[in-house]
Structure formats: C-alpha cells, structure tokens
Amino acid sequence: MQTRIVHAIAGTLIIGSLLLGIYINPNWFWLTALVGLNMWIHALTNWCLMYLILNKIGVNKDDSHCKSC
C-alpha cells in the first residue's frame, strides 16, 4: 500500500509542479527536480522520506487487503 501511495504523491507533485512551472512561474520546475532527485536517491540507497512519513502515520506496508491478487 505504501508503494502505491508514494507513487501517487510523486506523480501528483511532478504533474502539479510542471503545470505550475508552465503557467505560473518557471521556478516551480525545481520541485520537479527535487522529486526526481528523491526517486533517484531511493533507487540507489533504498531510503525515502515519504516512506518514513507513512510509517509514522501508520500506513500498512503490504497489500494484505488484496486476497485475490
């Protein structure tokens, strides 16, 4: 479940910052770069701030709710 939430948040931030960068101010592209950098760091080190936040608020780590998968 955490993985799906992290991907949804990252995708929303990327699309949102791209739209803000195009229509409001190009400085919003820095947010896109930071999200990409965080994804790159996670791929190399297996550390992600969003996973830490989700653990703190008690989001389940596995997809045990899906019995037919």
Image: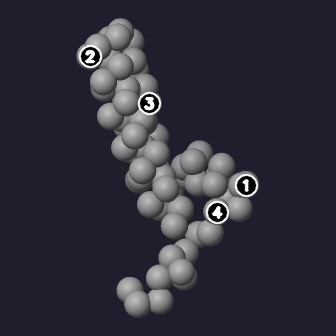
**Dot in front, 3 or 2:** 2
- Secondary element under disc 3, as helix, strand or loop, is helix
**Location of the C terminus (image quadrant):** bottom left
Determine which residue is flagged by label 3: 34
- Mark 3 belongs to which amino acid? Leu
Q: Is residue 13 above or below residue 26?
A: below
Tell which tag, 4 or 3, sits nearer the viewer: 4
Residue shown at the point (37%, 26%) measured from the top left = 17
Residue type at mark 4: give it.
Val
Q: Which residue position holds label 4?
A: 59
Secondary structure found at label 1:
helix
Mark 3–mark 1 Cα distance, whole angstroms, equals: 22 Å
Mark nearer the N terminus (3 vs 1): 3
Please say if the residues under marks 3 and 2 sit with CB atoms less than 8 Å apart. no
Res 48 seen here: yes
Q: Earlier in the sequence, mark 2 or mark 4?
A: 2
Give the residue pinned by disc 1: 56
Which of the numbered marks, if any, corresponds to residue 22? 2
Relative to the observer, which residue lies in front, 47 or 5? 5
* Distance in Å between CA atoms under marks 4 and 3: 24 Å
